Image (spheres, coloured by chain):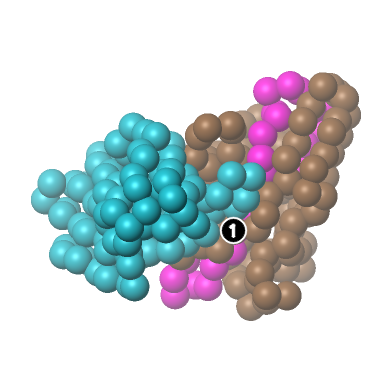
């Protein structure tokens, strides 16, 4: 059974701060790693994908992957109230199946 | 259309009724997925289509669940004799073959079984 564990929330940060979201996964054969953002009552939206060890930056978002530690994280710099949502860590294997974490609820306080 | 569309957005069914949920993927997206999302949980895989072929239905929870995509575009998820435990949000996602795991989700159908 493939497992994806996310740091338990909810996470609350002040506006302008860095929000750090963490995730570990059990399957060493995992090959693709994603962060989805899901606003309340809405569908998941892909915001970051990462496939190799290291950091990947896109605007205020940085994804970090460490396959040896089976760890992936998402940093959100200069957090905005509009970043308030549930963030899902999603792991892909060698095929099309994705395994989703339960999500971490982030609240950015103005 | 610009994104994945699903209909209806909300469905209330009495226990024992049959329901049909529709998904219209992004144009040109060969791969189509159905997921079930319970409250407070991440989505869970139900089934996968590549064009009209259903390549994996291992996530369907019972034989009351049936999915089809006869022309390789629109897909329908049918649930027969609905039960209360079927209440959930049903999400459809699509992707291109080269990036099958980069899936784009529709708005979902929230099914409530009374």
Q: Nearer the viewer, residue B22 or B89?
A: B89
Q: Chain of mark 1?
A: B
When asked about the image quadrant of residue B26, the answer is bottom right
Residue A84: x and y in percent read 47, 49
Where is residue A90 drawn, in percent x and y?
Answer: 39, 50
> Is residue A106 in view from this perspective?
yes
Q: Residue at horizontal 66%, vertical 30%? A: B62
Q: Is residue A49 left or right of residue B67?
A: left
Q: Identify whether A41 is placed above or below A59.
A: above
Does residue B94 show up magenta in the picture?
Answer: yes
User: What colour denotes chain B?
Assistant: brown
In this rendering, the count of numbered labels is 1
| Above or below, B97 relative to A5 | below
Q: Identify which residue, A71 or A75, lies in the foreground.
A: A75
- Name the residue: 79% across, 26% down: B113
Picture coordinates of residue B8, whole percent (x, y): 82, 50
* Residue to which mark 1 is pinned: B105
Q: Position of residue A48 (x, y in %)?
A: 37, 64
Give the residue furthest to the bottom. Answer: B28
Toward the front, the furthest residue is A110
A17 lies left or right of B23: left
Which chain is in cyan here? A
The residue range painted magenta reads B78-101
Rendered image quadrant of residue B79: top right
> Viewed as shown, does residue B14 lie left or right of A3?
right
Residue shown at 33%/58% (left/top)?
Answer: A16
B99 or A63, which is in the foreground?
A63
Q: Is residue A40 magenta?
A: no
């Amino acid at each position: 059974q493939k497992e994806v564990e996310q740091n338990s929330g909810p996470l609350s940060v002040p506006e302008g701060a860095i929000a750090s979201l963490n995730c570990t996964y059990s399957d060493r054969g995992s090959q693709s790693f994603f962060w989805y953002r899901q606003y309340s009552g809405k569908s998941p939206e892909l915001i970051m994908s990462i496939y190799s060890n290291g950091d990947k930056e896109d605007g205020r978002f940085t994804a970090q992957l460490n396959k040896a530690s089976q760890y992936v994280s998402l940093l959100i710099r200069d957090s905005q109230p509009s970043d308030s949502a549930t963030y899902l860590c999603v792991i892909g294997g060698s095929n099309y199946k994705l395994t989703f974490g339960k999500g971490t609820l982030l609240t950015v306080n103005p | 259309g610009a994104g994945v569309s699903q209909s209806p957005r909300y469905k209330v069914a009495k226990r024992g009724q049959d329901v049909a949920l529709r998904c219209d993927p992004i144009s040109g997206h060969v791969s189509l997925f159905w997921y079930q999302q319970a409250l407070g949980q991440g989505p869970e895989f139900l089934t996968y289509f590549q064009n009209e072929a259903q390549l994996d239905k291992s996530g369907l929870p019972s034989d009351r669940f049936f999915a089809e995509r006869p022309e390789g575009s629109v897909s329908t998820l049918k649930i027969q004799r609905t039960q209360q435990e079927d209440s959930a949000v049903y999400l459809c996602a699509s992707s291109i073959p080269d990036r099958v795991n980069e899936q784009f989700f529709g708005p979902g159908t929230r099914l409530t079984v009374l």
